Image (cartoon, rainbow, N blue to C red):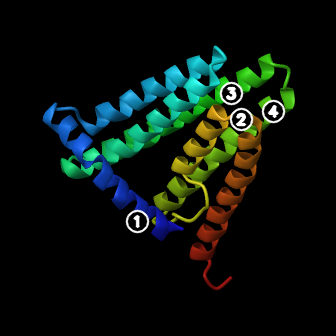
């Protein structure tokens, strides 16, 4: 799975190269792109609260593409930095939090309390997928396993919003994020205790 993601990232870097070059020419930094992603996710959340699900999904997908673009721009401009990586990761968590909160609000407002509760679990799972990798890497370990990363989560939620399948997308996300977090926990355990 990681090999597929690496291949797609290289392909997306090529696809984003013209836009990244234009942003570089405009003196826009990767960190500014990360901050624009947060703003777009706030717009997506506001559209969700307003009940404009299709438009919210489109904006969420656009915001998710900025998450890829900031990395492509950083690599092109050789502006990768530890703070940039920190800001990018933090922006991702903020973005997921506000959009999932808006989804939970939408479900609660429309008399779907179970779906609202499952949205909170989907957010918890999403955060755990990211946290388990970060914590493992903080221990000096590699932890890129897992079937759903942020990119897959964004696409799943965006399609759920745009095609009227939001509850199904959330149910799938609950299962897949729990599975991915478990994969990462077990992968870390095997690295820490290889003989166990």
Q: Residues within 10 Å of mark 3 (few under 14, many from 20)?
A: many
Q: Secondary structure at mark 3?
A: helix
Label placed on residue 103: 3
Residue lying at 72% horizontally and 37% vertically, measured from the top left? 165
What count of labels does the image hold? Answer: 4
Nearer to me, 23 or 98: 23
Q: Is residue 114 left or right of residue 18?
A: right
Lower sequence index among marks 1 and 2:
1
Q: Position of residue 1 (x, y in %)?
A: 54, 68
Lower sequence index among marks 4 and 2:
4
Of all residues, the one furthest to the front in this rendering is 163
Asked if the residue under mark 4 is in contact with the one under mark 1, i.e. CB atoms within 8 Å, the reply is: no
Label placed on residue 49: none
From the image, tell me which residue sits under label 2: 166
Q: Secondary structure at mark 2?
A: helix
Quarter of the figure that contains the C terminus: bottom right
Residue lying at 71% horizontally and 42% vertically, measured from the top left? 169
Lower sequence index among marks 1 and 3:
1
Q: Position of residue 84 (x, y in %)?
A: 32, 42
Q: Position of residue 123 (x, y in %)?
A: 66, 39
Nearer to me, 190 or 59: 59
Q: Is residue 161 left or right of residue 94?
A: right
In front: mark 3 or mark 2?
Answer: 2
Lower sequence index among marks 3 and 4:
3
Q: Residues within 10 Å of mark 2 (few under 14, many from 20)?
A: many
Label placed on residue 7: 1
């Amino acid at each position: 799975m990681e090999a597929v993601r690496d291949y797609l990232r290289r392909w997306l870097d090529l696809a984003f190269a013209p836009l990244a070059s234009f942003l570089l020419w405009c003196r826009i930094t990767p960190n500014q792109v990360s901050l624009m992603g947060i703003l777009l996710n706030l717009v997506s959340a506001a559209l969700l609260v307003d009940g404009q699900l299709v438009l919210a999904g489109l904006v969420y997908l656009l915001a998710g593409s900025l998450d890829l673009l900031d990395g492509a721009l950083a690599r092109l401009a050789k502006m990768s930095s530890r703070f940039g990586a920190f800001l990018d990761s933090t922006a991702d968590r903020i973005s997921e939090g506000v959009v999932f909160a808006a989804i939970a609000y939408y479900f609660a407002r429309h008399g779907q309390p179970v779906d609202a509760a499952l949205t909170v679990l989907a957010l918890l799972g999403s955060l755990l997928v990211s946290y388990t990798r970060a914590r493992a890497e903080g221990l000096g370990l590699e932890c890129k396993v897992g079937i759903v990363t942020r990119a897959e989560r964004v696409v799943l939620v965006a399609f759920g919003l745009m095609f009227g399948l939001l509850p199904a997308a959330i149910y799938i996300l609950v299962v897949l994020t729990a599975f991915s977090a478990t994969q990462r926990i077990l992968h870390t355990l095997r690295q820490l205790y290889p003989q166990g």
